[in-house]
Image: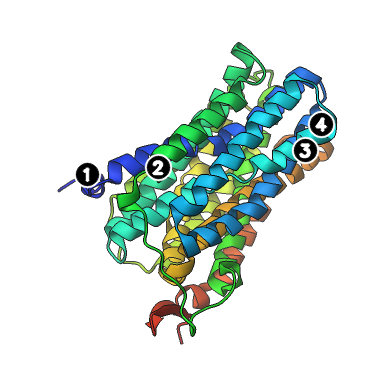
Amino acid sequence: MSNPYSRIFSEPGAKGFSAAAFLGRLPIAMAPIGIVAMLSQTLGEYWLAGAVAATYGLTNAFLSPQISRLVDRFGQSLVAAPATLVSAAGFFLLMLAVDQQWPTWTLFATAVAAATMPSISALVRARWVELFRDRPELTTAFAFESAADELIYIAGASLSVGLAAALFPEAGVLASTLFLVVGGAAFLLQRKTEPRVRPAQMNGPKGSAIRLPAVQIVTLALVFVGAIFATAEVCAIAITKELGQPAAASFVIGVYAVGSFVLGLVLGALSLKTPLQQLLLIAVCVLGITTLPLVVAGSSVTLLAAAVFFSGVAISPTFITAFGLIERLVPESMLTEGVTWVMTGIGIGMALGAFVTGWVVDHFGAQNGFWVSVVAAAATVLTVALGQRTLSGERISTGGSAAVVPAK
């Protein structure tokens, strides 16, 4: 039996754009925590550090789909290149504002500029679609990218904090910015694999991809999944601190991502015939079931790590099938924007999940924070179950455009 990952990387240009994209999206994990580390060390005010990081995150959540919409209309290099330059300039000005002790408002202004960073995760998935549209290799490619995302979240945050602590406060943000510039340039200069622009036709869908019911359903479901992901991180930190082993939090969080990483790679190697919308429902049901042991797993680090590993196995399968549905249901002229909305949903869910879980932990104890995961998982299952009819539709060509036709 041949290795399916060897097949996808045998395509001309695949290794190059995938490697460049890995570097280019490290800032997804490095930048937010790097901002917090930089500002908390230099100014000593955690509320301000959190506020600036939140400004960056929420602004990026709003701007990324708009940038991706322009990418679908004008092409990756024409739009993403200037957006990357503006973002890099924003990060450099933010570091300068901290170093030179500029007025507080400049921290927020430069964070907004930095938030123009394009969604490299969406851009790289669009390139895989261009190579393997309507072919089984696309599932393998999406599985690889989901696994890569897991590694980025593990390595990126740790690297950013480690650099700031070991070198100087701005080191994490500086490294993140250099990865953005170098990785982004290496990715965008590979023009041969850049997807061609597919203009929307007069009788095709109009406006933003988020207006499509399928995108709304998948994005909402991934908001709840993002909340589950964030809850595991917050609770791991809180519980290990209560157990007197705060350093074990990084181990527990790493185990969570490893479970997802491993099963994601396995799923990508399989050729499953089950419809994607049903696979997504199965994945989120498994996700819901595996959150239940978490509420009673806080008596030891070993038990917590085991429960967290078990609960992480369905994350990557959920991401893989979700992106597969977007590729299948969203018109080709809106693909990058559609993928970006899903990525934005994950980010919003992580932000909201961290906030709600923190409140629950403060008021009801660290162990009870995992009830946020249980509720979010139930909401995910309900969203996907109610959306099965819409998600079972097909994208059809109509006069050169595409539309989603619900199943009857």
First in sequence: mark 1 or mark 3?
1
Percent position of residue 66, x then y: 60, 58
Dot in front, 4 or 3: 3
Mark 2: amino acid: Phe
Residue 385: quarter of image: bottom right
> Seen in the image, is 317 located left or right of residue 229?
left
Where does label 4 land, which residue? 48
Inter-mark Cα distance, 4 to 3: 10 Å
Where does label 1 land, which residue? 6
Crowdedness near tag 4: few (<14), some (14–19) or many (≥20) residues, C-alpha within 10 Å: some
> Seen in the image, is 249 located left or right of residue 101?
left
> Seen in the image, is 7 located left or right of residue 315?
left
Dot in front, 1 or 3: 3
Mark 1: amino acid: Ser
First in sequence: mark 4 or mark 3?
4
Viewer-closest of 284 and 179: 179
